[in-house]
Image (spheres, rainbow, N blue to C red):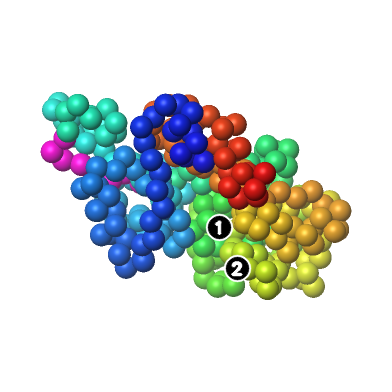
């Protein structure tokens, strides 16, 4: 996605993948900083850990409580912090890491685009309360959903989110259980569905699928998880996380490069890489 976008815009940049264990995350970020990287993306389980590692947090990371994008900035001669791309001719002595979150906006954009769903006033069942679930819950609250039902294996994590929503978004009703009546959207933020033999993230006895449900799974590989298959069989509208991946990546691209992301190019590259078409 990113390399296709760099090529389309004629940028002499390269996006590379690296494995780093959680206990080595601080060293990995520091290594990227001293080697002159423009920025990084982080995935699970690094998004929460990075909050306490980066030198500064953008408002997006503060609001959504997770870091999935880092931009390295240098201090200019007049004392301003600027993206490294603006300081290539005059390398700075001091460089800092700034954490951003592009996941939340990526999710909202994908829901509008792939499910044609405006979130204001909707009732949503959210499965999972980890880093992705927390960001999703807070984004849904800012978008004005009327009710949010939080289901998570560890109740304490869901309780933390409920407390935060009740404090900051009093107009949103947040409950810790399956709803007793219908919802507009079921949203999976857990990792259940990545493996073929995974159990459903939703308890069908507690909350069976109905044709009125739109179901969004943040997982994009496989293209159709067991959750999406079950929802489709019940007649519901479904979408996977490819759109979220695209839009969060496009926002990260713009944070690093200062240029408008070529969405069509990035989408085409994603579909070819993930689905082979």
SS label for mark 2: loop
SS label for mark 1: helix
For this view, does 148 lie left or right of residue 139?
A: right
- Locate residue 197, reporting x and y percent: 68, 73
Q: Are marks 1 and 2 in contact (CB under 8 Å)?
A: yes
- Residue plotted at (29% across, 31% down): 85
Q: Would you identify the image quadrant in which residue 37 lies?
A: top left
- Look at mark 2 in the image and give the residue it sits on: 152
How packed mark 2 is, by other alpha carbons closer than 10 Å (few <14, some 14-19, many 20 or more), is: many
- Residue plotted at (38% across, 56% down): 18
The reply to whether the magenta stretch includes residue 210 is no
| Quadrant including the C terminus | top right
- Locate residue 80, reporting x and y percent: 21, 30
Helix, strand or loop: magenta stretch: strand
Question: On screen, 275 above or below 8?
Answer: below
Question: On screen, 254 above or below 146?
Answer: above
Please tell me which residue lies in front, 74 or 100: 74
- Locate residue 107, reporting x and y percent: 59, 45
Q: Give the range drawn in magenta.
A: 92-99
Q: Find the residue positioned furthest to the front.
A: 276
- Look at mark 1 in the image and give the residue it sits on: 133
- Locate residue 268, reporting x and y percent: 61, 37
């Amino acid at each position: 996605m990113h390399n296709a976008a760099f090529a389309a815009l004629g940028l002499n940049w390269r996006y590379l993948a690296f494995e780093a264990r959680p206990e080595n995350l601080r060293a990995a970020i520091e290594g990227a900083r001293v080697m002159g990287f423009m920025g990084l993306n982080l995935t699970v389980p690094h998004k929460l850990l990075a909050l306490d590692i980066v030198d500064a947090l953008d408002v997006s990371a503060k609001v959504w409580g997770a870091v999935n994008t880092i931009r390295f900035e240098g201090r200019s001669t007049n004392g301003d912090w600027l993206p490294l791309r603006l300081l290539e001719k005059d390398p700075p002595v001091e460089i800092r890491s700034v954490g951003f979150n592009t996941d939340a906006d990526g999710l909202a954009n994908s829901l509008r685009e792939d499910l044609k769903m405006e979130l204001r006033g909707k009732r949503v069942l959210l499965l999972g309360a980890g880093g992705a679930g927390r960001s999703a819950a807070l984004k849904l609250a800012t978008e004005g959903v009327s009710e949010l039902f939080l289901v998570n294996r560890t109740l304490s994590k869901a309780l933390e989110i409920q407390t935060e929503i009740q404090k900051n978004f009093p107009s949103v009703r947040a409950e810790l259980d399956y709803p007793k009546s219908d919802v507009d959207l079921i949203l999976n933020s857990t990792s259940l569905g990545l493996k073929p033999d995974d159990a459903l993230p939703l308890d069908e006895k507690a909350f069976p699928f109905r044709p009125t449900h739109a179901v969004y799974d943040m997982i994009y590989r496989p293209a159709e998880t067991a959750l999406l298959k079950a929802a489709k069989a019940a007649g519901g509208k479904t979408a996977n996380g490819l759109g979220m991946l695209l839009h969060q990546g496009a926002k990260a691209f713009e944070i690093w490069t200062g240029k408008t992301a070529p969405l069509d190019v990035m989408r085409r590259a994603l579909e070819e890489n993930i689905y082979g078409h």
